[in-house]
Image (spheres, rainbow, N blue to C red):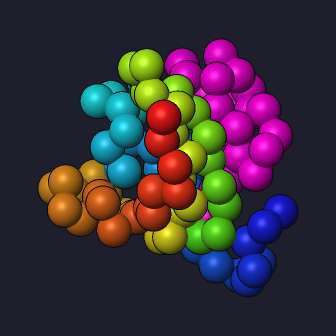
Amino acid sequence: MSRADHDSPVSRLDKWLWHARFFKTRGLAQKACESGRIRVNGHRITKAHRSVGPGDVLTFVQGRIVRIVRVLAVAERRGPAPEARRLYEEIAHD
């Protein structure tokens, strides 16, 4: 795992993707996780309950765009877009 501090806060992958506003509903995020279309630190994920936290790198397709983002923080709720944008840093997208 690439998280530097193992005591850092974590979140379920599907919940984090929804909080960060990559998916409109948590159900859609869950389906994406279970379909194997998301990678965490280079490993294909098929479980929505996979934990992610600061330092993890996520790779997934959104529409026709391949996104690579680094998790910076986890959130307690799904807030407005500017708040959600602070949860990650965009590494690349094609």
Measuring from the top left, give residue 71's x and y in whole percent. 54, 62
Image position of 83 (left or right of 11): left
Q: Is residue 30 above or below residue 11?
A: above
Residue at position x 70%, y 38% in the image: 39
Residue at position x 29%, y 30% in the image: 24
How many numbered marks does the figure carry?
0
Q: Is residue 88 above or below residue 21?
A: below
Measuring from the top left, give residue 85's x and y in whole percent. 30, 60
- The answer to whether one can see residue 30 in this image is no
Image position of 28 (left or right of 51): left
Q: Is residue 34 magenta?
A: yes
Residue at position x 64%, y 79% in the image: 8
- The answer to whether one can see residue 3 in this image is yes
* Range covered by the magenta-colored residues: 28-53
Q: Nearer the viewer, residue 65 or 24?
A: 65
Residue at position x 40%, y 20% in the image: 63
Q: Is residue 27 magenta?
A: no
Image position of 28 (left or right of 82): right
For the N terminus, the image quarter is bottom right
Q: Nearer the viewer, residue 30 or 56?
A: 56
Measuring from the top left, give residue 14's x and y in whole percent. 52, 38
